Amino acid sequence: MKNKSKLALTWSLSVLITLIITTAATMKLAGQPQLVEIYSKIGLLQYMSILGVAELLFVALFLWPRSMKLGFYLLTGYFGGAMAVELSHGTIFIIPGIILTLIWITAYLRDASIFRPIEKQVSKLTTATIL
């Protein structure tokens, strides 16, 4: 993939992820009635605003280049947990799965080293430190 195409795709996906997560977080913080009903049914109503703040924090960490890996790991855990909650309550887990897939694709395009084995990352760090 050419650099311009890769850059355009990476930033397009980053903007899409940001819009989706920011919208969901804002709806949680605003206490949208439909979400209040859902969170009441699953017993997480008291955590709804905390989850909204967490989403905003995690996506901000993911967007900032220096903390992208941390944001990636936190978003992966968050949406993996969202999928688990959806499955445990018999609802559709596809939406958190799609968001998680977009996060992983974007993370790969931004920094493929996230998906390399740790041994290879450590050896690169050791070599760079010696030089």
Image: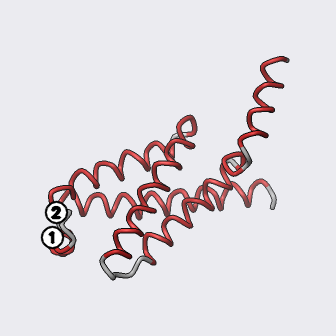
Tell me where residue 78 sits by quadrant.
bottom left
Residue 82 x %, y %: 38, 65
Give the residue at mark 1. Answer: 40
Residue 129 x %, y %: 78, 19
- Label 1 element class: helix
Whether tag 2 and tag 1 are in contact, CB under 8 A, the answer is: yes
Q: Amino acid at mark 1?
A: Ser
Residue at image coords 52%, 48%: 73
Q: How many marks?
A: 2
Tell me where residue 22 sits by quadrant.
bottom left
Image quadrant containing the C terminus: top right
Give the residue at mark 2. Answer: 45
Residue at image coords 30%, 58%: 25
From the viewer's perspective, tell me whether residue 13 is left or right of residue 111. left
The vertical placement of 105 against 56, above or below, is below
Q: Amino acid at mark 2?
A: Leu
